[in-house]
Amino acid sequence: MALLEKRIVSLYLILDKLSYHSLYAQNPPELLLLDEPSNHLDLASLEALQLMLKRYRGALLLVSHDEIFLQSIGIDKRLQMDPEGWRLELC
């Protein structure tokens, strides 16, 4: 089994709500809702998750405090909350 396939299998076992099969299905979901998906992952699983999310072409609503993770998957818009309220930022 190739290293990438091992990482994807490892990721699949760790993340029970995010299915490798559904992301690569002929009709993948149009929207993913993820809450701190990079928490508690080993390096191989984190890299596999980053690769899958970079290739994902649907809408992604993601909560994360991990700036490096957000940059690595190419987030282009961000909804930020500050004392004055919510604002949409382009990355």
Image: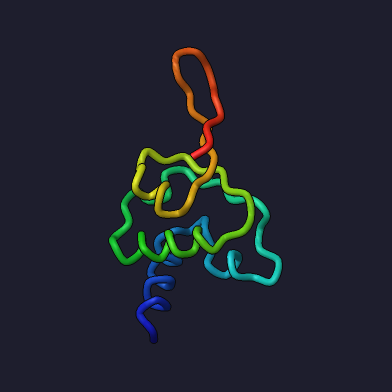
**Going by the image, does 27 lie left or right of 12?**
right
Q: Residue furthest front?
A: 90
Q: Where 62 sits versus 24, above or below?
A: above
* Residue 35 vs residue 86, the one in the foreground: 86
* Residue 87 vs residue 15, the one in the foreground: 87
Q: Residue at x 50, y 60 (%)?
A: 54
Residue 20, horizontal then vertical, whole percent: 52, 67
**Going by the image, does 44 lie left or right of 26?**
left
Rendering colour mode: rainbow
Q: Where 26 sits versus 76, above or below?
A: below
Q: Residue at x 36, y 42 (%)?
A: 67
Q: Residue furthest right?
A: 27
Q: Residue furthest left?
A: 43
Q: How many marks?
A: 0
Q: Where 1 sits versus 80, above or below?
A: below
Q: Quadrant of residue 56?
A: bottom right
Q: Quadrant of residue 6?
A: bottom left
* Residue 49 vs residue 41, the one in the foreground: 49
Q: Where 91 sits versus 60, above or below?
A: above
Residue 85, horizontal then vertical, whole percent: 52, 17
Residue 18, horizontal then vertical, whole percent: 52, 58
Q: Quadrant of the N terminus?
A: bottom left
Residue 88, horizontal then vertical, whole percent: 56, 29
**Going by the image, does 26 lie left or right of 78?**
right
Q: Residue at x 38, y 84 (%)?
A: 2
Q: Residue furthest bottom?
A: 1
Q: Residue at x 45, y 14 (%)?
A: 83
